[in-house]
Image: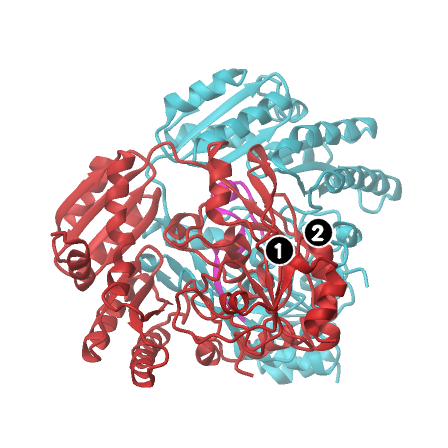
Chain colours: A cyan, B red
Amino acid sequence: MDIFDRLKNLIGDESRITRCEKVRAEHSKDCSSYHIGNLPDCVVFPKNVEEIKKIVEFANEGNIPLVPFGLGTSVEGQIVPTRGGISLSFQKMNNIIEVCPEDFYVKVQPGVTRVQLNEELKKYGMFFPVDPGLDATIGGMAATNASGTNAVYYGAMKHQILGLEVVLATGEVIRTGGAYLKSSSGYNLTSLFVGSEGTLGIFTELILKIHSVPRFIMTAKAVFNDVESASHAAIHVLRNNGSVCKLELLDQSTISAINRYKQTSYTELPTLFIEIMENHFTQVKEMLLLSDCCELEVEDIDEKREQLWSIRHEAAFAIKNLFPGKKLMATDVCVPLTILPVAIRNAREVMDRNDMKGSILGHVGDGNFHAVFAVAPFDQGDLERAQHVNNAIVQFALNNGGTCSGEHGIGLGKMNYLEQEHGASVFIMKKIKDMFDPKGILNPGKIFTS
Amino acid sequence: MDIFDRLKNLIGDESRITRCEKVRAEHSKDCSSYHIGNLPDCVVFPKNVEEIKKIVEFANEGNIPLVPFGLGTSVEGQIVPTRGGISLSFQKMNNIIEVCPEDFYVKVQPGVTRVQLNEELKKYGMFFPVDPGLDATIGGMAATNASGTNAVYYGAMKHQILGLEVVLATGEVIRTGGAYLKSSSGYNLTSLFVGSEGTLGIFTELILKIHSVPRFIMTAKAVFNDVESASHAAIHVLRNNGSVCKLELLDQSTISAINRYKQTSYTELPTLFIEIMENHFTQVKEMLLLSDCCELEVEDIDEKREQLWSIRHEAAFAIKNLFPGKKLMATDVCVPLTILPVAIRNAREVMDRNDMKGSILGHVGDGNFHAVFAVAPFDQGDLERAQHVNNAIVQFALNNGGTCSGEHGIGLGKMNYLEQEHGASVFIMKKIKDMFDPKGILNPGKIFTS
């Protein structure tokens, strides 16, 4: 009997196990990254923790790779079944289990998406702040410690996850943390699992902190003559205003690409997008103008605010549409804030030198930025050129006190930098991996090169 | 040659190793908790990571217990050398290594105290927000994942520590995290070490996130007819105001104790102390009055605000001074916010039933509260009665979705609850402990009963 038949016996519901070529292909790679996919032997759609427990026990016994799959929006190949095996889809585990607005938490299954969750939370005047851009499952966002534009105020997934239910490689089910906002009770296993990219255990339930929707939001678009002035202004605003929840930077070339893509005529200079949750109009305007801002627009009406943000949101599409058929490579370093302007300038120079057209999107509030460019993964020359640019950006970050991944995780794409960044710590990480998953069945071939 | 002589040879500076009875006694127990102390064989005052590396290698080779010591303000016996050995004091490792206000971080040695750090940060208009009440070393606060009054807004130590330098039991020195505000690069070892109470490694350097001092602070003292109304008002304020940075509750008996201690005449009813970092006077006043607040005082002048807070700060002293010579037992559970009023009422009833006079201080913004009472540790009857009360409070929390420790850690005092709270997770924690410290030399006898 092959894996497929044995899983059918195990789950007893044929409709939720498939080896259909099309479904396997959908579970073979990230939906838009440049990473090359690999087919799983089959895809399973479990309904509950008991089924996952059975599947994990079965996989562990048979040394079968197990790769958790949310919506496939990972960008470093986290969901590629490098060695085949079982792709474990959370499509049918998408229930919001419990909403407790007065306790500021929600319990969800891992297949719940952030858009779905926020639709529900809206009823209570609350929301879940982690926003990586695309819709994604909460389980996947937890696995990569996702963050995005709101992180400058609300932090990343690791700051918002209060507790987990996890199936270990042995099939044992454990719980970490709980539905309380604070604890100093034993080792922080929750934070160890968050960001472990499916390599230490399978999440089956998550308890998340939720927040009230701010009563007031003000969005500013501020144009500067150079990236340095924009960055200095950003730090100045951050140091003087505790209510900044988004702080994004697009460089000059990115605004040009957007103008070409959208047929618009925004001033083609480095531009900050700032969101503040208080009515600090006068103070912020003053700060920005004192910081050499040469053009300023401030909006507090939702529709107008969204118009401003749409500029920022179009940046990646502006590139993708210039190169139909190509896939995206998104670099993802994070550096100390004062290093950011020179890191961005360096990235743009490396891109120009290598004739690599792309956008630069800076989460300037936390020193994280992405250079996004189009790559043909099967064109060896194109791929190598892109990897050369990515590498130069990462090396600059690592040489200047930064990290090789701000929010996308290691996956397949950043494995080569782990030891350079963390030194001896990597051996501790590997020992932890071996302890949790001695047979190496949980998302094999990710994070560690060996 | 005994430990003392061998350490002298190792460090080569006699003045920083002592077996003086008085110094050993100072390093034998928490400065004010009820836990019974035990003398270390000697106390060492290392100056740098190289010395600590040597000491740890020596201890590991000789199976000698090693207990890190900051200022001794731990409350669950974390610094008691249960099996003798070496008390490792950080008194001479108290340098602030680097202040980078524009990058929002600071690098410190573990012996730096939070008061010392905030004195320095004041020069830059910045501060470190974690405030457990007493002065404490940053290393000790990291070891117990301390929090305190500001946690409702800024979170606990785990939210503020960006990176660590750690000496492992083998003497190997590793670095985790870094001086960047965000990362998804590999397992989150930083969070695993934070809160590990000296049992996984010795911190030798910490990178902390720092924050700008708020431009405006408003403090309110709001009196309610019962704990339930006060708790509901607290949740109401939290849900409608994102700028709440402190939210504390004292129950009726606590206000009475303070009046007797300070010869004051504050209304003897449950009282909230609220701090807000924006000028939301009208909105907050309205919310509180709509929430059945029967007496309200709001201040925004520093001196007046401090007068209000002094009431809250006197609560523990009010009890301690009633019982000269006794030590303090501080219960420390954390429950979901909506459980808090009934948990506090239950705690007060248990205390009354057992004739245990004490204060109840609730960090009502995060569901954490302390019942603080005086105990004579060597009076078996007194100790048992106190432990009975503490146990009843912990059991209520655990039965209602809470944790046995909100911010003080496990140490010696909460070991018996670890398995009840975490179930199978405890075995994972123990496996991690064995992996990091196979000989069990790092702060032995803490967190785990076996």
Q: Amino acid at mark 1?
A: Thr
Q: Which residues are magenta?
A: A146-165
Above or below residue B82? Residue B312 is above
Above or below residue A90? Residue A261 is above
Contact between marks 2 and 1 (CB within 8 A): the answer is yes
**Among the 4 quarters of the image, the one containing residue B405:** bottom left
State how far apart marks 2 and 1 are (Cα): 10 Å
Q: Which mark is residue A76?
A: 2
**Among the 4 quarters of the image, the one containing residue A77:** bottom right
Identify the residue shown where x is 83% and y is 30%: A354
What chain does badge 1 belong to? Answer: A
| Residue A156 forms part of the magenta stretch | yes
Question: Residue B359, percent across and down?
Answer: 25, 64
In the image, farthest residue toward the right: A381
Q: Nearer the viewer, mark 2 or mark 1?
A: 1
In primary-sequence order, the first of circles 2 and 1 is 2
* Residue A39 seen in the figure: no
Residue receiving disc 1: A144
What chain does badge 2 belong to? Answer: A
- A144 to the left or right of B419: right
Quarter containing the C terminus of chain A: bottom right
Question: Residue B340, percent across and down?
Answer: 28, 64
**Among the 4 quarters of the image, the one containing residue A365:** top right
Q: Amino acid at mark 2?
A: Glu
Q: Residues within 10 Å of mark 2 (few under 14, many from 20)?
A: many
SS type, badge 2: loop
- How many marks overall? 2
Question: Residue B38, percent across and down?
Answer: 51, 76
